[in-house]
Amino acid sequence: MKAYTLKKYGKPQEVLKLNETEKPSPKATEVLVKVCATTINDYDWSITSGKPFSYRLIFGILKPRKKLRIPGMELAGIVTQVGNNTTKFKVGDAVYGDISNYGFGSFAEFISIDEKALTLKPDSLSFEKAASIPHAAMLALQGLRDVGKIQQGQKVLINGGGGGVGSFGVQLAKLYNASVTGVDTGKKLEAMKAQGFDTVLDYKIVDFTKSDQKYDLILDCKTNRSLWKFLRVLKPGGKYVSIGGISGKLLQMLYMRPVLRLFTKKRVHMVMLKANKDLDYINLLFQENKLDCIIDGPYGFEELPWAIQRFGDGLHHGKIVISLT
Ligand SMILES: NC(=O)c1ccc[n+]([C@@H]2O[C@H](COP(=O)([O-])OP(=O)(O)OC[C@H]3O[C@@H](n4cnc5c(N)ncnc54)[C@H](OP(=O)(O)O)[C@@H]3O)[C@@H](O)[C@H]2O)c1
């Protein structure tokens, strides 16, 4: 089978090599899946480029760890073989999922992965749309609903709203009739407006943390400022929910959380992603036409390294999808 392999950090077009490799065999609890679509996530950018440096503590200091030899963490595809102790799927089933709890390796024509990482794909979803959902939609849903406890009619701000999480976040917030502000930059702003954001702010021009506008809920996909700045634009009783960002700022949040509880009713939270949880609910929203995927692409398999660079350069809007069909 063809697969992208990685032995060192660097520019995606230089370090990701499309090689002929051995097709894996499923272990007892695994299924072999023919990958029909995969996506680009921030992990892929970090695993390939080695940036930001702090991620190397997880992925390998000098070079990517061996288990990351084939990157990629999200896929939609067809089961072609099942392990001896599997119970969920049969050969021919269309499946999709965020596989990062069980390993990486979706930048390949086939992957063998624990069946728990996958869910049945509804017929109504194309492989490209299905692949784009699990990681970003779960982060948005868990951030807004489970952690942020979003309420009807609230004023919500999504920092870094033009990316994968923001594109699902605005649609989910609208189900609660929220007024939604998105912060991002460049050409993405127009697309964000078309997608349902009530207000869009260019972070290169406006610093929303210095404005008089106050929010009930902030969903932060970047966590790139001091916590105090975010608290300034939260209403009393408001919630700030970070899904990830700069390590130093995240650490500051963790230290300050208990102290803040003593002095203010504003609350600070972090999302610990529960991969694939509530995909059934997201499917229902799709079937009811209440949710759609904002796809950048789909691009061909041979364009995958270029697409990772596109992600790193911040040129994408929504989710970058790679099609293998
Ligand atoms: N909590 C968890 O368990 C967990 C697990 C996995 C991942 N994550 C986190 O999830 C996040 C990924 O979100 P995503 O997929 O939506 O990322 P994304 O697609 O990269 O979107 C982020 C957006 O923010 C924009 N941006 C850059 N600098 C900004 C600034 N100063 N102010 C406002 N916006 C800015 C980016 O624009 P440019 O591209 O132009 O820079 C991009 O459009 C990451 O922070 C990651 O660490 C969390």
Image (tube, helix red, strand yellow):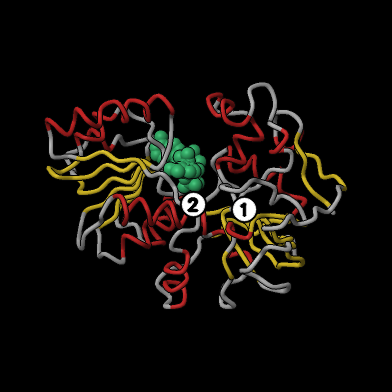
Which image quarter: residue 50? top right
Residue 39 is marked as 1
Q: Does dot 2 land on a helix, a strand or a loop? A: helix
**Can you say whether 127 is above or below 140 in the image?**
below
Residue type marked 2: Gly
Which image quarter: residue 248? top left
The N terminus - image quarter: bottom right
* Residue visible at 21% across and 40% down in the picture: 267
Q: Does dot 1 land on a helix, a strand or a loop? A: strand
In this view, the residue in front, 179 or 249, is 249
Query: Under 8 Å from ligand 1: the CB of mark 2?
Result: yes
Residue 185 seen anywhere in this rendered image of the structure = no
* Callouts 1 and 2 close, C-beta under 8 Å: yes
The residue to which callout 2 is attached is 164
* Residue visible at 56% across and 47% down in the picture: 101
Q: Residues within 10 Å of mark 2 (few under 14, many from 20)?
A: many
